[in-house]
Image (tube, rainbow, N blue to C red):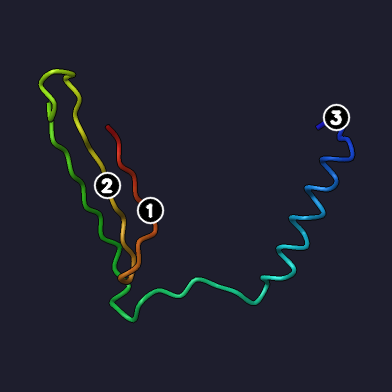
Amino acid sequence: MSNPDKDHWVAVKWIFQSLRGTSNVCLIYGSGNPVLEGFTYSNMLVDVDTSWSTSGYVMIYASGVVSWQSRL
């Protein structure tokens, strides 16, 4: 940050142009109840040979997914 070069300024210009072009765009979720729900999943020791497990979660607000993750 102490010595930005031309590539940095080009990236900043691109970000501002993108923001200006999408200033009237917003996220709209379903008409469901404004409730935050969270679901998790885990399955331990799926593959006995490698001892790997899987897990994950999903967060839903007003019938729209706002965050999710899955890991092996």
Return the x and y of residue 53 as percentages of the image width and height.
19, 29
Are the residues flagged by discs 3 and 1 in contact, CB closer than 8 Å? no
| Residue 5: quadrant of the picture | top right
* Image quarter of the N terminus: top right
Residue at the front extreme? 49
Identity of the residue drawn at 25% across and 60% down: 37
- Please determine whether, in this image, residue 51 is positioned above or below residue 57: above
Q: Disc 2 versus disc 3: distance between alpha carbons?
A: 39 Å
Are the residues flagged by discs 1 and 2 in contact, CB closer than 8 Å? yes
Identity of the residue drawn at 40% across and 74% down: 29
Residue at the bottom extreme? 31
Identity of the residue drawn at 16% across and 38% down: 42
Question: In terms of secondary structure, where does tag 2 sit?
Answer: strand
Instruction: Name which of mark 3 and mark 1 comes first in the sequence.
Output: 3
Instruction: Name which of mark 1 and mark 2 comes first in the sequence.
Output: 2
- Please determine whether, in this image, residue 16 is positioned above or below residue 68: below
Return the x and y of residue 9 as percentages of the image width and height.
85, 45
Q: Amino acid at mark 1?
A: Ser
Q: Which residue is mark 3?
A: 2
Identity of the residue drawn at 60% across and 74% down: 25
Residue closest to the eye, 58 or 52: 52
Q: Amino acid at mark 3?
A: Ser
Instruction: Name which of mark 2 and mark 3 comes first in the sequence.
Output: 3
Residue closest to the eye, 39 or 72: 72
Return the x and y of residue 62 as percentages of the image width and height.
33, 71
* Crowd class of label 2 (few under 14; some 14 to 19; many from 20; radius 10 Å): some
* Image quarter of the C terminus: top left
Res 58 label: none
* Crowd class of label 3 (few under 14; some 14 to 19; many from 20; radius 10 Å): few
Q: Which residue is mark 2?
A: 57
